[in-house]
Image (cartoon, rainbow, N blue to C red):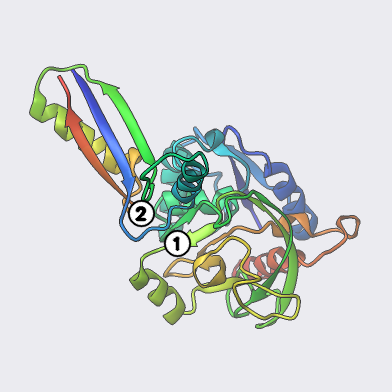
Amino acid sequence: MKARVTVTLKTGILDPQGKAIEGALKSLGVDGIASVRQGKVFDIELAGADKAKAEASLKDAADKLLANTVIENYRVEVLS
Amino acid sequence: MKSAVLVFPGINRERDMARALKLISGHEPAMVWHAETSLPKGTDLVVVPGGFSYGDYLRCGAIAARSPVMDAVRQFAANGGLVLGVCNGFQILCESGLLPGILMRNARLKFICHDVHLRVERSDTPFTRGYNAGQVIRVPVAHGEGNYAADEETIRRLEGDGRVLYRYCSASGEIGDTHNINGAAQSIAGIVNERGNVLGMMPHPENHVEDIMGCTDGRGLFAGLAAHLEQAA
């Protein structure tokens, strides 16, 4: 089973890296960029076949390590 | 003083720290590998040194904070033991839940490596008793992620309880945006936990302890700790 955990900064948390990327895109002349916030994506291969169990494990992984919930939100998706 | 310096893969300031501890307390610290599940018997100070544990992968300090030795450190702190985290050590203490908040990327995105001035906010703690309240000291910083952040409630409680012990300032002790090198909330350079026995700070006092270093302002922190532990013993 494949899954994806997406970690993003909470609203209101300053994102200087996102700001720098936003500036670079604007200076490259890419049209229509209003703002950029950056984050992380984890593609995870799961051993079992139980979707509910997989979601619980991924949530556990995100809470324990992948995200720092002081500043970050995460989203768990079981893809296949 | 019976100190223990933790060693994680990727840490590079552990020998500077051990040297400073030996120099000031007269006692050689124990070097404790991250895979250990206990601290040496009789340890009265745990030091989490600076460097780049696990190459700063994921988030600074995130992986080191989950290593076996940190369970022993949490237990040690819960029993009132003194813990000092410097630079990456501060990041590790935040990630391990021993201190609130997090160290974010520096506001201007640059790695900062030079001397800074710190104002010592109070002198009635084991971590600051070697200084006077309001004293300005000069110590180096070397970090890319030292921008302290926490939710408003946490910042209010830190300030209300007097738990900010060190703040970035000018040479004459003024606090302000121009002296706040990394954009930290309230110019915070170092904080303690609620119980007052765990300090995390970004600057490196261990690098200003000998005349040959050009400044000895960092000695007060270690001398204060040594005096405190000697008195307690």
Q: Amino acid at mark 2?
A: Ile
Tally of marks: 2
Marker disc for residue B157: none
Image location (x, y in percent) of residue A3: 22, 25
Q: Nearer the viewer, residue B136 or B31?
A: B136
| Residues tagged 2 and 1 counted as in contact (Cβ below 8 A) | yes
For residue B160, above or below residue B165: below
Is residue B60 found left or right of B166 in the rendered image? left
Q: Residue at x 32, y 45 (%)?
A: A8
Marks 2/1 same chain = no
Q: Nearer the viewer, residue B92 or B151?
A: B151
Which part of the image, by quadrant, shows the N terminus of chain B? bottom right
Give amino acid for label 1. Answer: Ala
With B56 as the anchor, is A15 left or right in this view? Answer: left
**Residue ID at (70%, 74%):** B130
Q: Horizontally, is A50 left or right of B200 in the view?
A: left
| Residue at which label 2 appears | A71
Which chain's residue wears label 1? B
- Chain letter for the residue marked with disc 2 in the picture: A
Residue under label 1: B149
Q: Quadrant of residue B200?
A: bottom right
Q: Quadrant of residue B45?
A: bottom right
Against B94, residue B161 (above or below) is below
Q: Residue furthest right?
A: B212
From the top left corner, tell me how far across and down residue B183 is, in percent: 55, 63
User: The residue tagged with tag 1: helix, strand or loop?
Assistant: strand
Circle 2 residues within 10 Å: few <14, some 14–19, many ≥20: some
Residue B117 x, y percent position in the rendering: 71, 69
Say which quadrant the C terminus of chain B sits in.
bottom right
